[in-house]
Every structure is written in C-alpha cells, then in structure tokens.
Image (cartoon, rainbow, N blue to C red):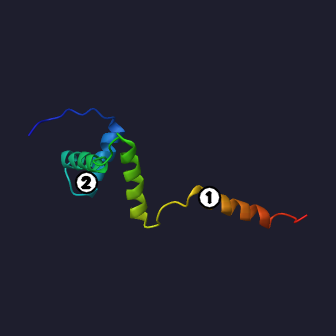
C-alpha cells in the first residue's frame, strides 16, 4: 500500500477525525472512503464530444424523470397567446 502525505488545517483535521470516529473508522479509512465517494460521484461526468452526445444526455434525463420530451416551440407560443388573451379587455 502506498502512503500519501496530506496537508490540512488543524480545524479540518479535527473535523475529519471526529467524523471518522462517528462512523467507527480510522482517519485514514475515512479519508479513503471520502475519496472513493468523490470518484464515484464524478465517474460518469464526461465532456460532450458531439451533438449526438448532448441529445443522448437530455434524452436520458427525460427518461429518468419520466416526463416525456419538452413541448415544441409552437405549443409554447399557444400557451403564451392563450394567457395574453385571458387578460385582454376584448376591445
């Protein structure tokens, strides 16, 4: 196993050590777990390379939310026009 020298402020070290104790871990184990969590959180974060990557990303988000695709622009305009006409005096 390799060693890493980590420089942190004393207040941070105290906070990290307290968190490790609460979780029943050594400070080293807690820091390794925190680093692993951070890597896992960022594992899927890749840059978009093509327009298809962007389209696939938003299609995946739509599927996750199960709300379907966004309405097209004409549908948005219809909603705006209807809203405007409700507030009109009709003269």
Residue located farthest toward the left when viewing the structure as drawn: 1
Please provide percent x and percent y for residue 45: 33, 46
Label 2: which secondary element: helix
Dividing the picture into quarters, in which one does residue 22 lie?
Answer: bottom left
Q: Nearer the viewer, mark 1 or mark 2?
A: 1
31 to the left or right of 61: left
| Quadrant location of the N terminus in the rendered image | top left
Per the image, the residue denoted by label 1 is: 74
Q: Does residue 61 lie above or below 51 as drawn?
A: below
Q: Does residue 15 lie above or below 2 as drawn?
A: below
Q: Earlier in the sequence, mark 1 or mark 2?
A: 2
Q: Residue at x 36, y 41 (%)?
A: 50
Say few, some or many: other residues with alpha carbon within 10 Å of mark 1 (under 14 / 14 to 19 / 20 or more): few
Please provide percent x and percent y for residue 18: 30, 50
Q: Which residue is more in the foreground, 11 or 34?
A: 34
Residue located farthest toward the front when viewing the structure as drawn: 74
| Quadrant location of the C terminus in the rendered image | bottom right
Label 1: which secondary element: helix
Say few, some or many: other residues with alpha carbon within 10 Å of mark 2 (under 14 / 14 to 19 / 20 or more): few
Please provide percent x and percent y for residue 69: 48, 61
Image disc number at residue 1: none
Mark 1 vs 2: CB contact within 8 A = no
Number of disc labels: 2
Q: Residue at x 30, y 49 (%)?
A: 44
Per the image, the residue denoted by label 2 is: 21
Q: Does residue 70 lie above or below 39 as drawn?
A: below
Please provide percent x and percent y for residue 24: 21, 57
Q: Which residue is more in the foreground, 87 or 4?
A: 87
Residue located farthest toward the right when viewing the structure as drawn: 91
What is the C-alpha distance between the residues marked 1 and 2? 58 Å
């Amino acid at each position: 196993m390799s060693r890493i020298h980590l420089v942190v402020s004393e207040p941070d070290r105290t906070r990290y050590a307290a968190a490790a104790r609460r979780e029943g871990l050594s400070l080293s184990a807690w820091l390794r777990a925190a680093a692993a969590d951070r890597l896992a959180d960022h594992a899927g974060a890749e840059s978009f390379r093509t327009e298809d990557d962007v389209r696939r990303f938003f299609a995946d988000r739509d599927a996750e939310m199960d709300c379907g695709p966004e309405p097209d622009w004409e549908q948005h305009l219809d909603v705006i026009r209807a809203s405007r006409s409700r507030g009109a005096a009709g003269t």
